[in-house]
Amino acid sequence: MDDRVREHAETIVDYSLDIDAGDEVVVRAPSVADDLAVAVSELLGERGAYPVVMSGREDEKQAAFLAAADPDELETPEHEQALFEAADAALHVRAHANASEMSDVDAETHAAYNQAYQPIQEEILSKRWLLTQHPSPGSAQLAEMSSRSYADFVYGAMNKDWEAQREHQEGMVEILDSAEAVRIVSGDTTDLRMSVEGMKTINDHGKNNLPAGEVFTAPVPDSVEGEVLFDKPLVHQGRVVEDVHLVFEDGEVVEHGAAKNEEVLTGVLNTDDGARRIGELGIGMNRDIDRFTYNMLFDEKMGDTVHLAIGRAYDICVPDDRDPNDSAVHVDMIVDMSEDSYIEVDGEVVQRDGTFRFEDGFEG
Amino acid sequence: MDDRVREHAETIVDYSLDIDAGDEVVVRAPSVADDLAVAVSELLGERGAYPVVMSGREDEKQAAFLAAADPDELETPEHEQALFEAADAALHVRAHANASEMSDVDAETHAAYNQAYQPIQEEILSKRWLLTQHPSPGSAQLAEMSSRSYADFVYGAMNKDWEAQREHQEGMVEILDSAEAVRIVSGDTTDLRMSVEGMKTINDHGKNNLPAGEVFTAPVPDSVEGEVLFDKPLVHQGRVVEDVHLVFEDGEVVEHGAAKNEEVLTGVLNTDDGARRIGELGIGMNRDIDRFTYNMLFDEKMGDTVHLAIGRAYDICVPDDRDPNDSAVHVDMIVDMSEDSYIEVDGEVVQRDGTFRFEDGFEG
């Protein structure tokens, strides 16, 4: 077994999930991630914890089940809910044998399943939980990379000093946490202004996502003004939407366009009222993620990028006395900030062409 | 996918487990049995039932966990127990990627795990449950067969008309159910007498085992007299014991021997008092199982054989007002009855050289 798999397993068990003797753990992993599941199972045995290893959420077994299921009859499976209720920690390993495995499942069934699964999802989020990636042929193909190079990329982004990364990111947390006005400018296509006044900024350093490497908060919903062009493609339900362009007034999308598959974007925006507002502002700070791989777990943490999500805001970013932007969707989109770009906070430039104010080489 | 996998899945879902809409099912299957798990998941979706697919009991993940675990610390995992408690049906698929996978797990850990797992095992046995086999390279290697021939063998034994098989077996159930004295004679090495008076005979026709194909009961514990030589090897904890020879007086083993690995046999007999008595008399009646494959799920149903288990008797064979033979072990051993052999019931020959009294060609 690749030593990097064992290193990854150690980070998962000892750092992210902080496993102790007696912990009961659910490991969701597709068969193509068996190497990681074996390494994690061994470590859980060493720590005195106990694994139940389940199939992955997007593997051939679940695809076959969902493609055959009647969406009108899908209910929350009580046995699966009982499993997670009794668990202390949940590990979800993503790894595609075939990234198109779910393509026979229609949108109605997807939606019905997600709704039926919602109580289980909430159960998982109330525990120690982690979403991570195992390199696999289908995920490499999605990234348009060889299996060998993809594995190098994945482990480069994940097997790192998370304490040092946390400290690096803390510089941006301090800036955003006390900020009011944020402005994001890139070339002559993006100039977006929003307020984050009173919102909480989260330092993502490997407790819930591996790879981690972003700092995120929620804008005040009706404060967003201006326009944005997303350089990186949006992938939604297996379809690629390119060059998404949005114009905001009073926080709401008033114009939208895309160079390819615009109707997918239109569909997302028409989901509900909250889908026309921004729920998340994120700053990608993991510079070992240096390319786009059609996998939001990595893409949103890419160094020298900013991402915005239309739709649902994270509760943890919003003070108790305010309502988070609510929506059935949360769709992230990415702006490249590495050239001819800057982030301005309360009138001061805090990042220019990807370099932060608290780093060497910054030119305000 | 092999059509025989789909046929197998249909037998499992519609015949053995009798799945209906709303049923919540736990499927335990190793990754090497993914084909079957996919076919079963698809059918469960079609029937409106819901699968949770778990890793297999003897795959590399569980082996890694158990090899690392401290036997003194193993407890019943509550999350796994909660899963089975809430389930309606449990499918256990056996398939070895490597039949020696568990060889790093010591006997103490095996025993501690089995004890910790006992409440879950009882939970499973209180539901609709099935143990079956998927053909795999490791299982084929254990059988000393090519993968292609092994698959033919497995499906030949499983994908058959179970109603016709049930009727065939009912002939032997009727004989044994009302019987008192049973005598088993093979060559000049086996002449064993026992009483089955008052014991219940079970027709195994595919509800809990696939393949099925045996008729079994329990002898009156202290009634067994005589000697027996088991032609087929006994495989216990990965070790092969050949030519087991036992002599019984008043139901108890008073002499024992083996041509190879006798100490394994001695260890089994010394487990407890019940391990020196016979808990099961079984008649193998599945003639599509025509060879020994070191897999008791198949071997004990082999046509023209009789098997005896030392140790624990099945409760369902014993009337409520009597105590079943009790032991921590239940170890099956097989006598070839195809030549120079007969079964006598209450003084009448009911099978000679493998042919039953109720079949053409029988020569009393």
Image (cartoon, coloured by chain):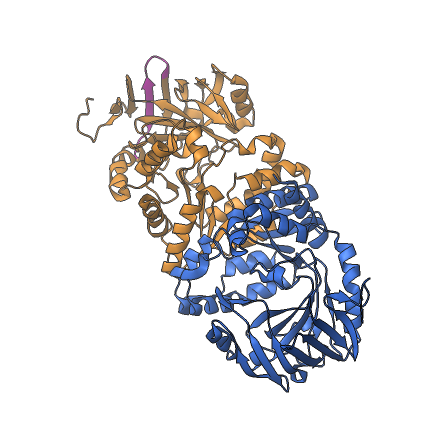
Chain colours: A orange, B blue
Image check: B60 left or right of A306?
right
Where, quadrant-wise, is the C terminus of chain B in this rendering? bottom right
- Picture residue at 38% right of the left edge, 30% below the top: A146
Q: Position of residue A182 (x, y in %)?
A: 33, 25
Chain part drawn in magenta: A178-190
Where, quadrant-wise, is the N terminus of chain B in this rendering? top right
Can residue A50 be seen by looking at this rendering? no
- Picture residue at 55% right of the left edge, 72% below the top: B243
Image check: A58 left or right of B131?
left
Can you name the residue that lies furthest to the left here?
A360
Q: Position of residue A276 (x, y in %)?
A: 50, 24
- Picture residue at 31% right of the left edge, 31% below the top: A179
* Foreground residue among A305 and A276: A305
Asked whether B22 falls inside the magenta stretch, the response is no
Q: Position of residue B68 (x, y in %)?
A: 38, 60
In the displayed structure, A355 sits above or below B220; it is above
Can residue A235 be seen by looking at this rendering? yes
In the displayed structure, A252 sits above or below B336; it is above
Image check: B126 left or right of A235?
right
